[in-house]
Amino acid sequence: MTGPDPLPRVAVVFDFGSATPMSILASARGLAEIVFLCDRNLPHVRALFDDIRTLARVCDITGLTDDRILAAPDCAGLAGITTFSESRIARTAALAERLGLCFLDRRAAAAVTDKYTQRRLLAEAGVQHTECRVVRDPAGLDTALDTVGLPAVLKPRRGAASARTCTVHTRQEAAAQLRAFTVPGGGEFVVERLLPGDPSVAGREWADYVSVESVISHGVIRHVEVTGKFPLAPPLRETGYVVPSTLGEDMRARVLHLAGAALVALGIRHGIAHTEVKLTPDGPRIIEVNGRLGGYVADLVRRARGFDLVRAALTVALGRTGDTAATTYRRHAFQYFLTPPMDAVAVRRLDGLDDLGRVPGIRFVETFAEPGTVLDWRRGTLTYLGIVHGSAPDHPGVLRLVDLVHRTLRIEYDHPPRGAESGPA
């Protein structure tokens, strides 16, 4: 008697990203055997390397060329390859191309990780023209602003989580922020026209943008979800998400149509996409397209409607279409980020977490900071102290729980001396 056929092997090029090793393994159960490709030169990987080895098969790719990675025994017979990390997309695309596996090709990988290239391709395809210029140093900033105009957004050409990203309203402010953001070997920046928001579209209690979570296999696009957002914290830091969004059917359809056109323009034929869309007075407009699962979105979609986006990413990596997402929402799921003010430089006090955890509707409170933790808004969204995970029967219920978060937690911060500069207002 022979045993069951072995599961196909899928490589996950691992680094900091939108899915943990445990969640990947849970989603892969019965679908694939996971082998994690781990480069210990990466701080996040180095910290988790020994733990991952106790959970799953690991291929240590530290210092290896692509040729040596593909020759490793653990990479023999791979049926799929993917990544959940923004910083590993280009390398995963190169490996997938060599192996003939389903992932972003090199052109699409460049488009989703290079904000300037992405704007150019969207314009060339007639999807959207947004003035955008590359800035390499303060000397080129004035010329870029002559074309882009003010107000504008300044951000790294490659990056994630709104790190070193802000709005600028004057040339002096733009120059000051570029100098503050620039570090040795820090790479290029782009300056692009600020898209105005219409707060009435999603509702004034919510952000004026949403994201679209899409699954693409062999060029066939399935939009799984439109994720709602809480209002941004200055300058452009995300403060959390809600599923479902508050969009009406007509606007939802317009947002999905735009997101689909953008995915086609960027040549995305395989994978998961997280497309951020601004809700402007002139209709929806692309903020940016990301060629990987959005951070924390998988948990929200799973809790709200039972669909597993991590499993969908692994299924697509195997060249399969996968299941269709159920359209019935079981609950309104949310994640709310505990975001410090821009001028906070350290946490002084963080109390009330146990009280908050006992509130009906609050699933759990995840914390990343404690008294004494140093803060810097330039890290973007990841400056948060923690995440409150919860759910409610409807959107008003979600807002009531968020209000309760503010009334329950007792948080104090240290601030810079009076007169010290902390960033844009």
Image (cartoon, grey):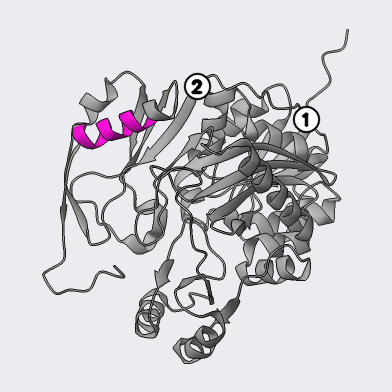
Q: Secondary structure at mark 1?
A: loop
Which amino acid, mark 2? Answer: Arg
From what the image shows, is residue 417 above or below residue 145?
above
Left/right of residue 286 with respect to residue 222 in the rendered view: left
Tell me the amino acid under the disc marked 1.
Answer: Gly
Q: Which residue is mark 2?
A: 331
Q: Is residue 277 left or right of residue 205?
A: right
Q: Is residue 149 above or below residue 54?
A: below
Residue 5 sits in quarter: top right
Span colored in magenta? 398-407
Residue shown at 59% from the left, 39% from the top = 226
Q: Is residue 384 magenta?
A: no
Which quarter shows the N terminus? top right
User: What residue sits 31% from the left and 70% below the top?
Assistant: 424
Image location (x, y in percent) of residue 185:
49, 77
Q: Is residue 57 above or below residue 121?
A: above
Secondary-structure class at tag 2? loop
Q: Nearer the viewer, residue 229 or 181?
A: 229
- Where on the picture, by quarter, is residue 91? bottom right
Q: Tell me where residue 418 sits by quadrant.
A: bottom left
* Residue denoted by label 1: 322
